[in-house]
Amino acid sequence: MEMVKTSFKKLPFIFFILILAACSGKTVVESDLGIKGAPDWVNEGTNILNDKGGRLFHGVGSAPPMGDDSLQKSAADNRARAELARILSSYMEVASKDYLASASANGDMSVESAVSRSIENATKLNLTGSRIIGRWKNKKNGVIFSIAEIDMKRVKETIANTDSMHPGFQSHFADNGDSLFDKTAKGGI
């Protein structure tokens, strides 16, 4: 009986140690999909990343079986490009807000609408430089996944060479685009 009382006295201490150990571990984010046998990009989904391949925007889309493989692939590709447009648009919004904050700090309040129009056009132009870099078909249910990619070099070239782009934004983007990308990649979109 004395041994049981001693064990119960130690229980809060053991519980505390377990909680402390659980809290001190590295945060692990698991895929929402968790499809066994799928490439990492399928399970990771749409994202931006800075790795040995460069600063990359990835859009992932899928399409269910449609009775026509060509149509299904095309639908998955288009959905991947739509995801790429969404993430690129979010990034460009971050870049434009950064520029507008900089411009307003310098007293230039007249640029907001011009920059907004320029950003929308640049996003559309950048998508023409995107490419489908992979497809994967789930053997269990026939769903096809596609991944579209565009790299930051292409985005910067498009911004620099767009005649209708606000010159102040072009300069700001050339100087700060990579660092904004890195901050966004670390924090997610």
Image: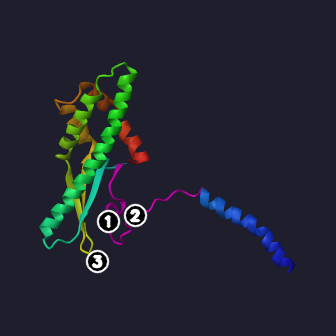
Residue 35 located within the stretch drawn in magenta: yes
Residue to which mark 1 is pinned? 39
The reply, left or right, for residue 73 in relation to residue 2 is: left
Q: Quadrant of the N terminus?
A: bottom right
Rounded to the nearest whole Å, what is the CA distance between mark 1 and mark 3? 15 Å
Give amino acid for label 2.
Answer: Asp
Q: Say which element carries label 2.
A: loop
Which image quadrant is residue 99 in? top left
Extreme residue in the top direction: 107
Q: Is residue 175 above or below residue 152?
A: above
Give amino acid for label 1.
Answer: Pro
The reply, left or right, for residue 184 in relation to residue 127 is: right
Which image quadrant is residue 91 in? top left
The label on residue 140 is 3
Residue 38 in the image, given as x and y percentages of width and height: 32, 68
Please give the name of the residue rendered at 28% of the width and 42% of the height, measured from the top-left corner.
152
Magenta stretch bounds: 24-49
Rounded to the nearest whole Å, what is the CA distance between mark 3 and mark 2? 18 Å
Question: Is there CB contact under 8 Å for labels 3 and 2?
Answer: no
